[in-house]
Image (tube, rainbow, N blue to C red):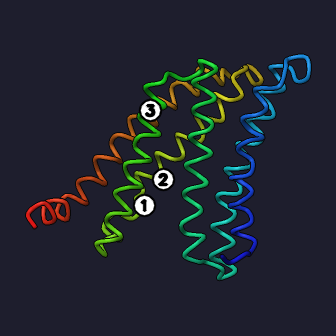
Amino acid sequence: MPLNIPILLTWSRILMIPVFIGIFYLPDTTLSLHHKHLFSTLLFAFAALTDWLDGYLARSLNQMSAFGAFLDPVADKLMVAAALIVLVNLEYVGALVAFIIIGREIAISALREWMAQLGSSKNIAVSMLGKIKTTFQMLAILFLLYHEPLFGFPTHEAGTVLIYIAAILTLWSMIYYLMLAMPQITKKSRE
């Protein structure tokens, strides 16, 4: 396993997950709800920043590796799943929305693994639609974690709208990836 700055940043995202979740289990006498919202939002924002930074550094420092390419999306999916589970537990997000987003991530990860085994992984490479979905999803989670109005801006309401848009984009992108993979699925089902 190579150890370089991009991979260390990716590991830091994974190691942040228990801290992120643990914030909400602290007694309100230790950390007020306002501070739980604030610190969880800052941790999630830091994780999102390291996601961008590790990819940028891997490319610019020529430190890309197969392990890093594997670990990076795993760290992303774990952090998003942890955030959605926390948000469902707090009743800031409906379980159905969380299921759609987490379920799609599992399904598309499995599809990509299967396509890679067939040597067709480039057929379902990350698309612009996937990137747009991720942007809406990350903004929604940040707003929902903060939950409180910010300088009069209704973060919870904005986050709710964005998470529904993200869920629709999630389903749309899943259908898009399945359609791209359909020729291989059809071919393999005939064998």
Q: Residues within 10 Å of mark 2 (few under 14, many from 20)?
A: few
* Residue contact between numbered discs 2 and 3, judged by CB atoms under 8 Å: no
129 vs 9: above or below: above
* Residue contact between numbered discs 1 and 3, judged by CB atoms under 8 Å: no
Q: Is residue 29 left or right of residue 135?
A: right
| Tag nearer the camera, 2 or 3 | 3
Q: Is residue 124 left or right of residue 93?
A: left
Marks 2 and 1 sit apart, C-alpha to C-alpha, by 7 Å
**Amino acid type for the residue under numbered disc 3:** Phe
**Amino acid type for the residue under numbered disc 2:** Lys
Where's the N terminus, which quadrant? bottom right
Determine the residue positioned at 37% across, 61% down: 112
Q: Residues within 10 Å of mark 1 (few under 14, many from 20)?
A: few
* Residue contact between numbered discs 2 and 1, judged by CB atoms under 8 Å: yes
Q: Nearer the viewer, residue 30 or 34?
A: 30
Residue placed under numbered mark 1 in the picture? 126
Where's the C terminus, which quadrant? bottom left
Q: Secondary structure at mark 2?
A: helix
Estimate the x, y position of residue 109 in percent, counting from the top left: 42, 55
Marks 1 and 3 sit apart, C-alpha to C-alpha, by 21 Å
Determine the residue positioned at 51% across, 26% down: 161
Q: Quadrant of residue 188?
A: bottom left
Q: Quadrant of residue 142?
A: top right
- The label shown at residue 131 is 2
17 vs 177: above or below: above
Residue placed under numbered mark 3 in the picture? 99
Q: Secondary structure at mark 3?
A: helix
Q: Earlier in the sequence, mark 2 or mark 3?
A: 3
